[in-house]
Image: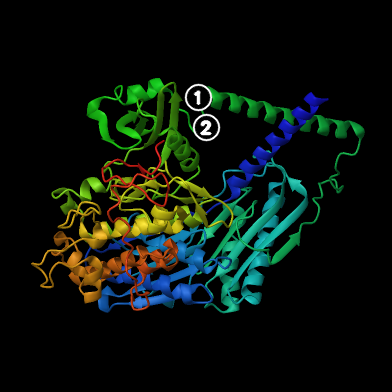
Amino acid sequence: MAARVLLSSKVILALVIASLFSLLRHCHALELMNWSCNNGSAYAANTTYDTNVHSILATLSARTLNATTGFATVTTGRGTDTAWGLALCRGDTDRAGCASCLAAVPAVAFNECRGDMDVTVFYDRCLARFSYVDFTARPDNTEVLIGSPSADRITADAGHFDALVVDLAGALADWAAYNSTLRYAAGMMTSGDGFTSTTEDMVHNIYGVVQCTPDQAAPACRSCLEALRVDMPKVFAGKMGGRFDAVWCNLRYETFVFFDGDPAVKLVAPPIVPENGKRRRSPENAAAVVGAVLGALVILLSLFIIYLWRRLKAKRYAPEKDVDSDSLLFDLAIIRKATANFAEHNKLGHGGFGAVYKGFLRDVGEIAVKRLDRTSGQGLEQLRNELLLVAKLRHNNLAKLLGVCIKGDEKLLVYEYLPNRSLDTILFDSEKRAQLSWETRYQIIHGTARGLLYLHEDSQIKIIHRDLKASNVLLDSNMNPKISDFGLARLFNGTKTTSITSQVVGTLGYMAPEYAVLGHLSVKLDVYSFGVLLLEIVTGRRNTDVFDAENESSNLLSYVCPTDRFFYGFLKVWDLWQKGIPLAITDTLLLHSDRRCLQDMELLKSVHIGLLCVQENPVDRPTMLSVLVMLHDVDTTNFAAPSKPAFTFANVRNTTSSSPSVAALSANEVSISEFHPR
């Protein structure tokens, strides 16, 4: 009897795990759907049109957030440099989601569509367009992009399925045009019969969303959506999902829920009637019932066997700890061959975790392998933590984890290789720093902020990085930043926003005072670290490489500036801000630029944001969403005034207490400085 109970509990556990995987597949954060680059005309960097389109996107973000309809249009410039812009957030998206979505648009517009004068970007929750022609004067959908239809198909009664999709789209179009001031509608169609599919699941529900720009009259909106609806059967024949991406109206359907809130339109499909005129009937005889039960038992047994197999496989590779068995497991021999047996000439660097080596895999390309020091007792828990967290994360501004290898004494993490390595290797090098123009630095600031916002709010799990610094920001071939090293990251769940930890870990100069002294942990710790990093990028100076005359430890927040530019003596950053000359702290390499006016505005704004992020009271620090909105805001007059920064690293070098309230910090270059030995 006990064995039966044990088997039953394991079967239930397997079912729960399968259900969780299904839920995770359908959960999504911010998703880039499509973009259009009109290559018919182009502009050069640092031109008036370049300035105008940057201004357009910043203004659109601010105005859309302030509009109750989530919609805005903007025009700026004169003559041939005039730019027109439009932004629209999906009707079920709140203000925070709208801001987060629009903040992601410039990265696509100025990278994938670099130099193009007419650009449209479609995310799942927003869209934005700018152009050198006045497209706002003619609201038509001549530039319709067909979103990649689902690879999954309906395998029986596909024509009836397509007809239901079209019927749902028609009902949604009517509702959006005549019942919604937002010109938005979400709904569902339910079929009692259901449809078999390539996913081996029975499809009973179809979900859809349509939307027009709110400035359109009801008939115009309905006509716009109808033009999309009539093309659906031939474009998406039998597909389980599809969408039309367009500026003035758009349409999407799926067989899973992809919108927020309750559907406004709920339809029930009539039963399917075969050619003989008799309705399909469910199995009613005993043999069919028995067959169905036996089939279900076979499926449950298969799930249980797969579950046991994965558990055994995970234990074989990680005897000390369970490792996420869904992660890609690399063979040690393959990694040794890829790195020439961890040859010295392939060594990229060394941190608190261990050495990092460059390698090459035929099917992957160049890789970076993080190798735990054999002689060190440190890092195993950090390796497991990084694997479990980063395997669940996917974002353009996070370093991509490719897999893991844990065998014997060798414990390795395999990442994508980023040719420009870490930000600190360029920013703090007197010769290489010249590669970082202000445009590149601003791009790094913006991308890092986007990565943190994803961790804090947009990912499926809320994560605090706890060790954000220049050496943990990697740069790809286009100088786009990617946050790395999640060995110290902390996972938060639900609505929980703060906690207290007895083990304070991190790096000198980047830890917020409430964390370093009291162990208080929240997302505002990462905000503080971001503020320090931002000031480092502006000044070109390392936060911990400055010491005052009395040899007391000091950091960038009390960094003394040279007097050859301003005759105010040796002033701290805060003093310079109060004196009204914050640009005195900027890197002298940024003084020579063809766009000094715009650059100085962005520099001033960046210093302002940096000081807001390093305020002593964590409540006063902005969220990363607010930071992104401010980075895109042209008007800084509505920014809050920063209070005096937190100076947390007074002379603490002689203290040795194990309490988190008093700590001895290390000023070396090791990635991790702890209050408690591992």
Residue tagged by mark 1?
Answer: 317
Residue 141 visible within the image: no
Residue 489 horizontal/vertical position (percent): 44, 46
- In primary-sequence order, the first of circles 2 and 1 is 1
Q: Residue 185: x and y, percent?
A: 63, 67
Instruction: Check the image and name the residue furthest to the left.
Output: 564
Answer with left or right where residue 489 lies relative to residue 258. left
Q: Are marks 2 and 1 in contact (CB under 8 Å)?
A: yes
Q: Amino acid at mark 2?
A: Val
- Tell me: 494 left or right of 546: right
The percent coordinates of residue 613 (x first, y second) are: 36, 63
User: To which quarter of the image does residue 371 belong?
Assistant: top left
Mark linked to residue 323: 2
| Residue 52 shows in this picture | yes
Distance in Å between CA atoms under marks 2 and 1: 8 Å
Q: Nearer the viewer, residue 261 or 180?
A: 261
Instruction: Tell me if 123 is positioned left or right of 333 in this view.
Output: right
Residue under the image location 24 percent in, 58 percent down: 556
Judge whether 565 appears above or below 24 on screen: below
Would you say 506 lies left or right of 600 here?
Answer: right
Q: Amino acid at mark 1?
A: Tyr
